[in-house]
Image (cartoon, grey):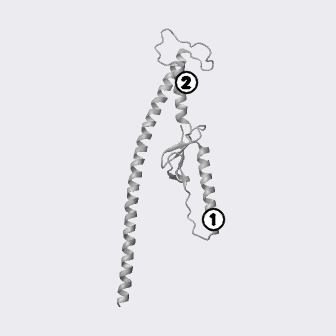
Amino acid sequence: MTSMQKFLRDQSSKHLSQLSQCMERNNGLTKEVEICRNRCNELVETSSKLEKERSQLKDALCVAEREAKRLGIEEDDSSKPKKRSRFSDSKFTREDLELTIENLMKKLSCPVCDVGQKEIIITNCRHMFCRKCIDKNIKVSCLFFMLIDLQYRLLNRFVHKNRNRKCPACGARFDAKDINDVFL
């Protein structure tokens, strides 16, 4: 009977140590979730501020375009002198308008390639990219995991079916279902 008690005591201590390890991991994961939740709230706040700024810039651009149209400023020929009324109270010059348009175009362009316009949003982290860059990211991760899958099959090991796609801007993981179209 003593060997049975010893066996049960060993098993009990083993299970208690496993339980304490699981509790430590759970506490660590809880802290990580809280950090992620706070970061998400920060990103939502930043996103709303940027959206408000974009709206204000868009309104300013509309006002500037109307003012330019009213003053008869032509966009095609920059060699001609600017047509301005002597009674004009406009604060915008052609350079101001061009600078505003350039800034708006920068905000709309993809941060990865700086060529395409933002068409896709990753809903987890709310970063926006052009479709080409996201498709490239998905294809690269698929090829990477296909190679890993093949390697594990050759070694007869367990294959974890994880698509480890990461946001090019912040590195947050995402899945194909986390991608949505953006209509700007």
State which tag comes first along the sequence, 1 or 2. Answer: 2
Q: Quadrant of residue 151?
A: bottom right
Where residue 143 sits, quadrant-wise, is bottom right
Question: Which residue is situated farthest in the bottom direction here?
Answer: 1
Instruction: Look at mark 2 in the image and give the residue it sits on.
Output: 98
Q: Which mark is residue 151?
A: 1
Coordinates of residue 28 in the picture (x, y in percent): 39, 60
Say above or below: 44 vs 92: below
Query: Where's residue 145, x and y in %?
Result: 60, 59
User: At 52% across and 35% down in the image, what residue appears?
Assistant: 107
Q: In the picture provided, is 148 more to the left or to the right than 126?
A: right
Q: Quadrant of the N terminus?
A: bottom left
Please state which of the two labelled residues, at mark 1 or mark 2, is closer to the viewer.
1
- Image x and y of residue 78, in percent: 61, 18
In-image side of 182 versus 31 (left or right): right
Whether residues under marks 1 and 2 lie with C-beta atoms below 8 angstroms apart, the answer is: no
Mark 1: secondary structure: helix
Q: Residue at x 54, y 27 (%)?
A: 101
Specify few, some or many for label 2: CA neighbours under 10 Å numbering under 14, 14-19, or 20 or more. Answer: few
Residue at (36%, 78%) from the top-left corner? 12
Secondary-structure class at tag 2: helix
The amino acid beneath tag 2 is Glu
Horizontally, is 35 left or right of 141 in the view?
A: left
- Disc number at residue 107? none
**Foreground residue, 157 or 138?**
157
Badge 1 local density, few (<14 within 10 Å), some, or many (20+)?
Answer: few
The amino acid on which the numbered mark 1 sits, given as a three-letter code, is Gln
Between the residue at mark 1 and the residue at mark 2, the CA separation in whole angstroms equals 54 Å
Residue 37 x %, y %: 40, 51
Count of marks placed on residues: 2
Q: Residue at x 53, y 16 (%)?
A: 70
